[in-house]
Image (cartoon, rainbow, N blue to C red):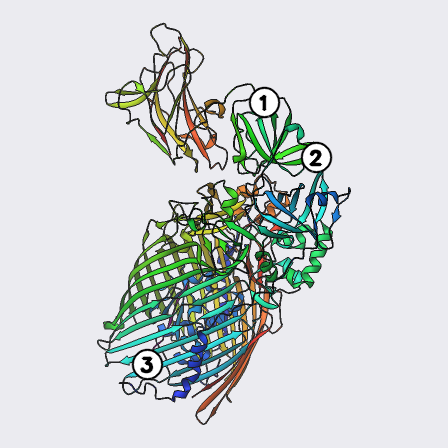
Amino acid sequence: MHNRTRQGSRTREPNPFPIILRAAVFALCACGLQAAHAQTDSTMVPALVDTTRVGEEPRLPVFTITADDLDSELGSQDIAGILQSSRDVFTATAGFNFGSARFRIRGYDSRNMLVSINGILANDLESGWASWSQWGGLNDVTRWSQVRTGIAPSRLNFGGLGGYTDIQMRAGEMRRGVRVSYASTNRAYRNRIMFTASTGMRKDGWAFTMSGSRRWAEEGYVPGTTFDAYAYLLSAEKKINDQHSVVFTGLGAPMLQGRQGLAVQEAYDLTGSNYYNPNWGLQDGVVRNARMSFVHRPMVMASHYWKPDERTTWKTTLFYTFGRDGRTTLQWFDARDPRPDYYRYLPSFYNTTDPSEADALTDAWANDVNTSQINWDQLHFANGKNLYTVQNADGIAGNSVTGNRSKYIVEEQRADPSRIGLNTVYSRQLEDNAQITYGGSLQRQRTHYFKTIDDLLGGDFWLDVDQFATRDFNDTLIAQNDLDMTNKVVREGDRFGYDYDIHTRYYNAFMQYEGKWENLEYYGGADLSFTQFWRDSRLRNGRFPEESFGTSEKQSFLTYGVKAGATYKISGRQFISANAAWMTRPPVARAAYLSPRTRGAVLDGLTDESIYSGDINYILRFPRLKGRASLYYTKIMDQVWSRSFYHDEFRTLVNYAMTGVDQLHTGGELGIEANLNSTLTLTAVYADGRYLYDSRPNASITRDNSPEVFATDRTVYWKNYRVGGMPQTAASLGLRYNSPRFWFVGFNANYFDNLYLDPNPDRRTSEAIGNFFDSDPQVAQLLDQTKLDANYTVDVFLGKSWLVKGYRIAVNATVSNLLNNQDFRIGGFEQLRYDRTDVDRFPPRFSYLFGRNYFAMVTFSF
Amino acid sequence: MLTHPFSLNYRSFLPLLCLLVLATSCKKEFDAPPVRDLPVGQVLTVAQLRALFQGSPKHFGGDSSFYAVVTADEQNGNLYRNIYVQDHTGAIQLRLQNPGGLYQGDSIRVYLPGTVLSSFSGMLQLDSVDVDNNVVKQATNVVKLPTLVTIPQITSAMQGMLIRLDSVEFSEAQLGMDYADAVGQQTQNRDLVDCAGNSVLVRTSGYANFAGDELPFGRGSFVAVVGQFNTDMQLFIRNVNEVQLNGPRCDGSVGPPPCEYAVTPVAGVQNDFSDVLIDNVDYSNPDWVNINEQGNRFWRGRIFGGDKYLRATGYAGAGVSVPPTESWLITPPVQASGSPTLSFRSAMAFWTHVGDDPFRLYISTNFDGCEIADATWTEITGFPEPTSSSSNYQWVQSGQINLGTYLPGGFSGNYHIGFRYYSVGTQTTTIDVDDISIQ
């Protein structure tokens, strides 16, 4: 955050308050619209989801817009420029102040927000998510982004439902100079150093940019979370002549991180901290985290910028990304659960049956680190004396291997992506200021899923068989993970368990027309896409000897989208705009498979999703009062949902798959920025949405380790449950003082409400209710959605800069959650495992907003 | 060509180069913790251990250990958190704090501190054994042969021992039953008897992987570990393959041949009997069962005017009285999914039945492919079918029969549909069926 010079505030403006009133009325309308959708489904009331299989979902892009960006765009006068979100007070505030509470604009997940780098789509083809960590630590370069929220015209791609972000990494357009910064913080990491140098366009037609950083912490805000990340970027641009430029960019960000695990409230209470992290423990006196992630996915790209004439641009980019994405976790066989917060190790498990044991555990949780955390030494001890003989090892008759068989190991689950893509966009200005844009892309991705032994924890080997299968069947072949090498003995570094690729193909073409009349600008666009995915496995396992091996059936989807919108200029200061889109899209490949680790079967009834969406916006651009009020409506239909978890009724790991999941997102947004005088700026932002499940999905439950189908056509009474995981209501009030002497100070007060946990689908079925009567407490326990308390936070920020002999020194700092509110639950999930007669046995797991935290940075640039 | 790519000072880039070097070494290795040992202390035999029990639970404190071999483990699901160990002096049951980790043939040292020697309803056990902390394995795959005994020799003194009985059989009254209730996952007792009439209980968990197997018919050898519940002596099977009751029973009877039926369950059925090749020959299709439960007649393939279908009849000539004839045509096993529907067409000719129906339709979820009488058959009714007043050979479409109403809610196993023809005396109405479809 830097100083920001105010301009245009000298001329006297008409009294802005009537406009505020009008905006308020608009907001009220938004609330009324939602009230109409407030009735709940039959007896159901609403809550997030076990992440047994699907990894943590990235949130809405971390906005890196700074005041610098806002400044850089002033001066652009056409309407499109005005609508640019980085100048939009709502979007900027939501990005800055709401991000920590996991706010998502309009409730959209990352899949709905297209992120591109130099025009190349960066969203993972398989999950649909944009992974910002891929270029984390390159903030000096990536902050040059163009952001639009909602349905909008785009000369880059068709755009997502929630808009798009395009990061420009063009050495020729980077400001010449060197920037070195150091930041101290107490969030995920403690220290950051960053260095960026750009040559600007040199006389010989070359321009270069280099950037690098390191972010690290022995321990972040949460105990046991280590952080060590580097980032590097090199970009070179060669301007061949006035028509042609080529840009080569390579970047990467290796990141090693010890992760935080969410716990049940009982564990937080026992340890006296809402930041208790069950993932770590002491090994020989040193903190060790069982859930490490080590991710490094470098990216290289070559872009060609062609300007055949003044009215035409043609951009083509070829890119390739590859690397590793590994996450470690504990694994065990025929042994006690080594996780400290397993429900049987909590005092509540003995509350009624054995109060003295409960008391002893309560005491141990408070005082014995080996009870409340992983006891690594004990795991080594157990492994070191578990003598075992594997008969006919490695599929060789008569071959026996004797040694200490590890009961507990750390495995690394890998999902290594490689993706190649070509993207081209042609845009031409026609007569009458109309603009036509054509574009298309070809992308191929292969994600290689496998796991390796990271650490045998003192044992000699691990036997590659399936734990559940050995228990459930009287046939030793069934338990084999690799029928072509039975009784496989694996050691550190060896692959085991599963080994398959998910291939994805994505080809699309789009066009867009933008027209301009005197008081009206309008656009229309259309997109046609072909998506295909399939599974290809190297292993043949004993549970599914036919289905587990080789190439599965290719799933193909031809989808389309159309969008249109118009902006009407009431005056040079007020605008009304409306946008609408109708589109279909393929199901997410990652959710399409019942259990991709064991077999190639996809969900029954896999089909396109369809979406319709629209918004109406009223925009103000007075010199002393800027703002926007919007209403939106989005319906997403026919989504699929799949997870694997331990089902208490069937007593085994099951694959739970739902089709026909509909969502309805409605709401309003209001953002106002008022310059009270030449130094004081007031911002007010309010978002109120209602994000609901809007259908009764059809669920099927399949045994994970055999073809047995436990249930089909199970109706999930999900209608009108709230979509979980983000505040549906958020408000912020901020005041900022800008001194003409190059310093600023300000604060924001933020309020969040209507946070829910996503509902566990199986608890909302007639099978779960069974023969309970309405008066039985279990009915409400099963059905009620977990709602989190409303909360507020206060943030302050300040900064100052100096110019000394051509060197610029800037210092700025932010303190977030100044009041140190440590009881603000910002998310979590209802456990999918549940006991229908004793729902509290598997209570939800929660995550809390960090208490008071800060980020302070000093920047030196020349 | 480009000797000076940057007009800036090179030294500016040194920090970046340092970063790149550092980035190459990201992961750190953890030290393995120092090796901890379980002391041995005083060494007991199993007999000495058992003798330490003086009527009240004994909690072990100071260092002591005993050595033994695991004779029965939890692998087959019959024993849960319970294993049996034995040395040359005796045997004892270990109750584990957590399941898993000890396997038959493991030669182990049990370090006693933390464990409790106690009696549960007459059965002496070493309780609270934490495999991770109380057990050190010495060797694997050590073979301990069962002791050959007779039923009267199984007494409290044999507690925990691995024994073998020769020349025993399951009680006649229980033949046809399973070892336990695998569906309801209930533990059940069966009686094992010898030819002298002595008997002993065989107790099997509903979670055992053989719980749903039918008791073997014959007489032979039987290996188990000995348990006790109050005054009852109980045997626990450690491996169902060690139950070898194959010979003739004490009364000399031999069992029926085992049912060998291995038709792969299908998702649906479509049969228009186009596989009938010769008219008026017993229908034969490896996936379909065609049995005469009474009499000697089967469903026969017919070809008439190019149409192929099946016919059952008891007719043996005008006015000829026939013995009871019961012919069953049974579909392959169908995997239940959703709400399946059945349709077919049927016809009758020369109705002579009085009172009884010549044709009945059944569904079963437990037909083994061999013994119709052993299965539970539910009759399907309420669909259009030919009656005494129908025209001869006039096809009647059954329409879509919802099978979901005949299957247990949420049933996901396999079921069979049975077409039963019955005739007796001069009631010899002919029945034809065709175009059987299950979707």
Residue drawn at x 47%, y 77% is A214
Q: Nearer the viewer, residue B439 or A685?
A: B439
Q: Chain of mark 3?
A: A
**Left or right of residue A502: residue A813:** right
Tell me if B76 is positioned left or right of B372 in this view. right
Tell me if I can see residue A227 in this picture. yes
Residues beneath discs 1 and 2 located on the same chain: yes
| Residue numbers of the magenta segment | A161-172
* Residue in the image at 32% along x and 65% along y: A420
Whole-angstrom CA distance, mark 1 to mark 2, is 27 Å
Q: Amino acid at mark 1?
A: Ala
* Disc assigned to residue B156: 2
Count every numbered label the image shows and give the total. 3
Q: Is residue A388 above or below residue B289?
A: below
The residue identified by callout 3 is A172
Disc 1 sits on a residue from what chain? B
Q: Is residue A164 magenta?
A: yes
Q: Secondary structure at mark 3?
A: helix
Q: Which residue is mark 1?
A: B173
